[in-house]
Image (tube, rainbow, N blue to C red):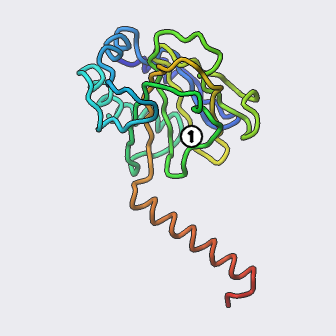
Amino acid sequence: MFDLNAFVATPLQVDPYDFVVVPAFVKPETLKAVNRDFPEFEHAGAVVVDELTYGPAFEAMVEKLKGSTIQGLFEKKFGLDLGEYSIMMTARKYSEPSDGNIHTDSKGKIITILIYFNTEWNEEGGRLRVLRSSRDIDDYAVEVQPVSGTLLAFRRSDRSYHGFKSCQSSERRLLQMHWVVPKRAHRDATKKQRFTTHVKRLIKKGTWS
């Protein structure tokens, strides 16, 4: 189903942040079956996989990605223990001209995986770029064509900027998978961070003693 040997053999890139790109990570015969069984929905934006209807090949791929073998490979690649994190998966089928703005993922995400399923791509836009800053879409380390089962994975950080130029083609198929901090833990950490920031502001103003 996946070319795991290619994933293992592909070195982790660290400039401008930790990422790895594996072309044809999804094997050609699997790609064909997954496209046949890809979820049917008619609107742009990401949809949680559990809320979609899809065929057996797509389901088998999802279950494989959730398994311990894939987790172990990503732990080794990124030097992380992912056991304490939850998995979140969403699918996208359609893009719109407003998509692709430069951003980093939310702080609750630890590792992001993007897998692309289009069989061809002829536009300049729509090719995700690993960016060096938040200011320039043309200052990038690598550009990823959204085709042929290509995988891009990166470690989320405050400088993990990425984005792509606007594209006109509406169908841009991908699966997004994230290891994320569980919601309760993330919520508690956010509250603690907000409280700490508030206390620092009070001290700075001289209103806390």
The N terminus lies in quadrant: top left
Q: Residues within 10 Å of mark 1 (few under 14, many from 20)?
A: many
Residue 175 image-quadrant placement: top left
Residue 38 image-quadrant placement: top left
Does residue 57 appear to the left or right of 78 in the view shown? left
Q: Position of residue 14 (x, y in %)?
A: 66, 34
Q: Write the residue at 38% across / 36% down.
A: 47
Q: Disc 1 on helix, strand or loop?
A: strand
**As displayed, is residue 8 above or below residue 155?**
above
Q: Position of residue 9 (x, y in %)?
A: 53, 20
Q: Position of residue 180 (x, y in %)?
A: 44, 48
Does residue 61 appear to the left or right of 139 in the view shown? left
**As displayed, is residue 164 above or below residue 185?**
above
| Amino acid of disc 1 | Arg
Residue 29 image-quadrant placement: top left
The C terminus lies in quadrant: bottom right
Q: Write the residue at 50% across / 64% down.
A: 189
Q: Position of residue 161 (x, y in %)?
A: 65, 39
How many numbered marks does the figure carry?
Answer: 1
Kindly identify which residue carries mark 1: 155
Q: Write the residue at 70% across / 88% down.
A: 207
In the image, farthest residue toward the bottom: 209
Q: Write the residue at 39% across / 51% down.
A: 84
